[in-house]
Image (spheres, helix red, strand yellow):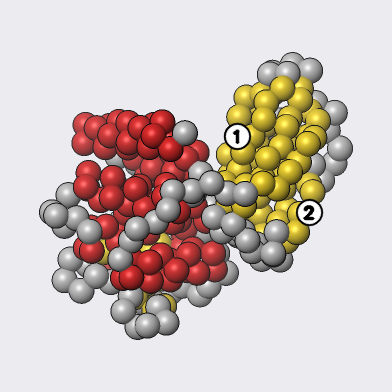
Amino acid sequence: MIKKILLNRKPCTIQLEIKTNEPQKLWIKVADSQQDHTFYTKRYSKVDKKQTFFIRLPQSPKIAELIVYNDNNKDYYNDDSSFKVSNIQIVPLKVNKLKLSKKTLSFIRFAQEFCEMCGVLEASPKGEVYTSNNGKFRIDYFDEIRGSGGKVVRTPARISQVNGRIEVSKKAFINFSVPMRMAIILHEYSHFYINENPHSETQADINGMRLYLKIGYPRIDAYNVFLNVFKTTDNIESVDRFKNLDTYIKQHEYNFN
């Protein structure tokens, strides 16, 4: 199922109801109908009989495509009788009021623009340079991030502890939703600009997630991107980092609600 929805790039929440006759694994995606490789959420859920979904969109396209399909039927252009989508509504996005520095707000605007466009932006082995309008922030966009000797490293992004420049891998980011990209970018920003200890991954996780959730991005995309990153590692530190993130996200939602 695909339904086009006029959102006019305004923050909002898409509310919808899905009904099934039996348990189904269903994918829910929100895409920019006018730009490739630009999704505002990518998630799946096992739906049994009836479930209501709320898709938070602090960023939205002019015209969105709401895509729902059964995991067993990837051709979502065809009708699928295994589920029914109804009661689609556009409701206000509820967020905490942001009390952030002008510097952080400026970076967030730059990061949002980059994360929305990076699916179609040019990248190269040497790194294409993208800078904020005020010239204070810079992202170098690589096809893949490489370390010493030109060896490819698995990280989707990293930040210089010398000058605060962020390096991003297009190979990784092109498959992420916009919120997934923002979660990673805000983590990197926190290392240099917010952390008490710039080298602490745990501090960057929590500081970045604090910004991510306050802006109003969906929890599920945050879980998905960090699981995606951590699955490439096999160490206790990654397990502890995910547990800390999980605890923080749940506590934030409890306090918010």
Identity of the residue drawn at 38% across and 66% down: 105
The percent position of residue 215, horizontal first and vertical second, equals: 45, 53
Residue 192 in which image quadrant:
bottom left
Visible residue check, residue 157: no
Residue 4 marker: 2
The percent position of residue 245, horizontal first and vertical second, equals: 32, 37
- Per the image, label 2 sits on a secondary structure element best described as strand
For label 2, the crowd category at 10 Å Cα-Cα, with few meaning under 14, some 14 to 19 and many 20 or more, is some
User: Disc 1 vs disc 2: which is toward the camera?
Assistant: 2
Three-letter amino acid code at disc 1?
A: Tyr
User: From the viewer's perspective, is 166 left or right of 57?
Assistant: left
Mark 1 → mark 2, Cα distance in angstroms: 19 Å
User: From the viewer's perspective, is 21 left or right of 228?
Assistant: right
Residue 236 marker: none
The answer to whether 201 is drawn above or below residue 45 in the figure is below
Identity of the residue drawn at 81% across and 30% down: 84
- Per the image, label 1 sits on a secondary structure element best described as strand
Three-letter amino acid code at disc 2?
A: Lys
Reading the image, the residue beneath label 1 is: 44
For label 1, the crowd category at 10 Å Cα-Cα, with few meaning under 14, some 14 to 19 and many 20 or more, is some
For the residue pair 243 and 37, the one nearer the viewer reads as 243
Nearest to N terminus: mark 1 or mark 2: 2
Identity of the residue drawn at 76% across and 54% down: 5
For the residue pair 77 and 57, the one nearer the viewer reads as 57
The answer to whether 218 is drawn above or below residue 24 in the figure is below
Visible residue check, residue 131: yes
The percent position of residue 120, horizontal first and vertical second, equals: 57, 69
Residue 39 in which image quadrant:
bottom right
Specify the farthest residue to the top: 22
The answer to whether 39 is drawn above or below residue 144 in the figure is above
